[in-house]
Amino acid sequence: MAEVAATSRVPSDRAFILASLIALAAAAWGLLIWQSAVMDADMSLTMGMGAPLFIALWVAMMVAIMYPTAAPMIMAFARIHNDRRERGQAFVPTWVFAGSYMALWSATGLVAYGLAVGGDELAGQWSWLSDNAPRLGGGLLIIAGLYQLTPLKDICLSKCRTPMSFLMNSWRDGLGGAVRMGLEHGAYCLGCCWLLFLILFPLGMMNIAVLAIITILIFAEKALPLGRQLAYAAGAGLVVYGAAVIFVPNALPTTMSDSQMGEMSGDSSGTDEMEDMAPGNSQ
């Protein structure tokens, strides 16, 4: 009876872990969608946010995008440790592996915020950067596309595509071992996808459609049989799109058109007129 109970508990444990990953990702998506709807338009790289809010939203973004794409690896880890527990061996809770994986991705938010602050300061001091920001964004898209075709991308992607192989070759026992494996998997995942997140600066950090496309692409690269081919196709698409943006800057979703600029200017002048007509402001 004890063996039957133990056997039935394993699938339920794994179902709970999968349900938890889905719930966390869904909650993070809900937060991002809400924030995108209520936030003010701000063309700066930091979107007018201070470090705490920017990093908090970055962490939510990583949970929303990376937990679904890392689910096969996390479930493989859970399966191994469930088997160890059933044999009476020492095991580590899955959240240790998943938490250390997400901790590494969350730490990249500090780097992202530093890049955003630095970019805004440079743009404020050097008008050429502001004037050519869309074309620079197009260049970044081209770089991201070319990276999709590099051997380093392929090496990192191969580690993400074979969960059991990665775990067997990188296995470490104990709590510290689980943390190390989570960080190592996170590093390979970062090596695979980092430029796909860097292009959020020109495409829109809170652009929900872009975030959804990146999530689908990363999952497809890792999980589908044609994942490598899809990575190459995405790379080619980014190169073509980046080249188009260089020649047509308005093709970038974060670029304001002349009509939009005119509307903002009109709103500003209208506000100024109202202020001039207010009591106490008449000459």
Image (tube, helix red, strand yellow):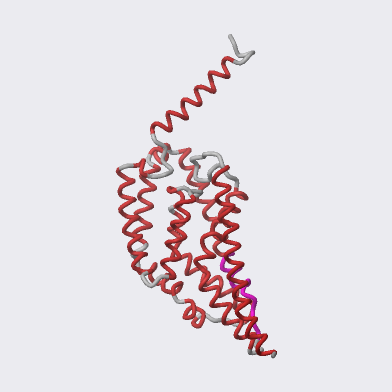
Q: Quadrant of residue 283?
A: top right
* Quadrant housing the N terminus: bottom right
Chief secondary structure of the magenta portion: helix
Residue name at image x 58 percent, y 77 percent: 78
Residue 256 or 112: which is nearer the viewer? 256
Measuring from the top left, give residue 258's x and y in whole percent. Answer: 38, 32
Measuring from the top left, give residue 34's x and y in whole percent. Answer: 58, 48
Compared to residue 165, the image places residue 283 above or below, namely: above
Q: For this view, does 135 lie left or right of residue 208?
A: left
Q: Quadrant of residue 216?
A: bottom left
Measuring from the top left, give residue 143's x and y in whole percent. Answer: 36, 56
Residue name at image x 54 percent, y 81 percent: 171
Magenta region includes residue 204: no
Measuring from the top left, give residue 187's x and y in whole percent. Answer: 50, 68
Q: Residue furthest right?
A: 2
Residue name at image x 49 percent, y 66 percent: 69
Q: Quadrant of residue 234?
A: bottom left
Compared to residue 198, the image places residue 132 above or below, namely: above
Residue 16 or 74: which is nearer the viewer? 16
Total numbered circles:
0
Question: Over which residues does the magenta segment extend?
Answer: 90-103
Compared to residue 63, the image places residue 247 above or below, namely: above
Residue 48 or 214: which is nearer the viewer? 214
Q: For this view, does 254 lie left or right of residue 177?
A: left
Residue name at image x 39 percent, y 67 percent: 153
Compared to residue 230, the image places residue 117 above or below, namely: above
